[in-house]
Image (cartoon, rainbow, N blue to C red):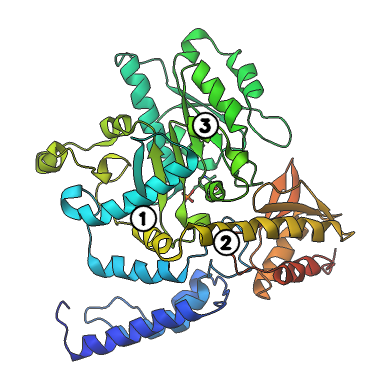
Amino acid sequence: MHRLDEETLKLEREIVNYALERVAMQPPPLDGPRSEADLAALFASNITEDGVGGHEALRRFIEGYAPATLSSDHPRFLAFVPVAPTKASILFDMVVSASCISGTSWLEAAGAIHCENEAIGWLAELAGMPPGSGGTFVSGGSLANLSGLHAARQRLKERRNFVRPDRFRILASEEAHSSIASAANMMDLELILVQSPYPGRLDRKSLESRWNQLTKDERESVIAVVATAGTTNTGLIDDLASVGSFAQDNDLWMHVDAAYGGAALNSFMRPHFDGIELADSFIVDPHKWLFAPFDAAAIIYKEPEYAQRALTQEAGYLDEINRDTAWNPSSYGYHLSRRVRGLPFWFSLATYGTRRYREAVESSLDLARATAREVERRDYLELALEPELSVVVFKRNGWPMELYQRWSMQALRDEVGFILPTTFQGSPAVRLCFVNPTTTIQDVKAILDTLAWEPRGA
Ligand SMILES: Cc1ncc(COP(=O)(O)O)c(C=O)c1O
């Protein structure tokens, strides 16, 4: 298994050829899910005492399992937040796999971590974070948010001389990503939801009115206020300057979740992020709109030492790296062993330069605006709100949620696109999220045309 014999060399060519063919597909097939029973019936067991052989395992994957696995980089994959990795980032991801790098500590991976930190530095600079800020790459926005909140709690713990309140608390808007509630749950924090004014942009006024309802003890137990720069459902950016001034005036840690929207810091939308420089921590996911493959999310701290004290793991066998004053990524996120998952992003940035990144992000911003105009042109559709970033939300007049769902599944079956309904202000709506520069207005028109459809039995 570990020797490069004739058979392995043959398999190497087969696998690499398949991977390169997949990279070259423009577009890749959208594909679609199949039931567990269907998949189980495709082939006999793959895991056997003697193995089925690499050639056969690859054949089964290509012919059976890959077509039942959606290509999230398809230009009409517009649900959730898709991915759109550059060719260079995908190819370099293969190098990362081949290189067997343990990205845990500087001792093990100084060169690779240097490169990752260069990419982190670029993101920090875009946000206007001061010198001394730093962070690392974790597997996703959820883990990045969790890590940021750990650092925030550490600062308050230290300020309280480790005297615990009845419970630690965070303030966040109702539009904050579900991973904030999940982190609060895991950390046993009380999540104090703040109702932001229509259409859902958190600001100082809404924070103050909730803050004024809290007791002194409750206020003193708040570890952070969480703002979102690009909400998942609508792409809105909270009023970061006023949230930041509220946080400063009340001595609170400000955490900014820019997992999706942070890419637009490098675009004509930069002024909408003013105030992000006040953040004590912020996150941005290169696997969302910064054209890196899964999985890479950056967590960046203004004062990384709080994260280091909160997250460093202690054990005799780790003493050597913990004694080291060099940058150990394991101390800045909730993880220990770590893939250097920021490297494909770094390689892509180095390859193409930040200007091409800006142009690519701006193409999605432009497409969102053009889509809004297309929606307005159709009498069976109604724009829910003007897009700020690259999410467009609109309604299909007269449809209950069930028809949106039927339309969505039909569109996937017909390979028209992968689009899921959402709810906006309590009513069903269609949500399109653009991060792929190869998506065109023709793709969008084709999707909008299918919404004229009246399903049988409607
Ligand atoms: C604003 C925001 N925060 C956090 C996340 C969670 O990121 P991940 O799915 O990488 O854990 C998402 C995911 O879409 C998001 O949009």
Disc 1 and disc 3: Cα gap in Å?
24 Å
Q: Which residue is mark 3?
A: 226
- Residue 338 vertical position relative to residue 356 in the rendered view, above or below: above
Circle nearer the viewer, 1 or 2: 2
Name the residue type under label 1: Gly
Split into 4 quadrants, where in the image is the C terminus?
bottom right
Q: Which residue is mark 2?
A: 360
Q: Nearer the viewer, residue 430 or 235?
A: 235
Circle nearer the viewer, 1 or 3: 1
Q: Do callouts 1 and 2 mark residues in contact (Cβ within 8 Å)?
A: no
Q: Which residue is mark 1?
A: 342
Q: Relative to residue 375, is residue 217 drawn left or right?
A: left
Q: Is mark 3 within 8 Å of ligand 1?
A: no
Name the residue type under label 2: Ala
Q: Which mark sits nearer the N-terminus, 1 or 3?
A: 3
In the rendering, which numbered label is found on residue 158?
A: none
Q: Do callouts 1 and 3 mark residues in contact (Cβ within 8 Å)?
A: no
Q: Is mark 1 within 8 Å of ligand 1?
A: no
Disc 1 and disc 2: Cα gap in Å?
19 Å
Spot occupied by residue 213 in the image (x, y as percentages of width and height): 60, 13
Q: Which residue does the image show at 48% across and 44% down from the upper left?
A: 126
- Residue 94 vertical position relative to residue 246 in the rendered view, above or below: below
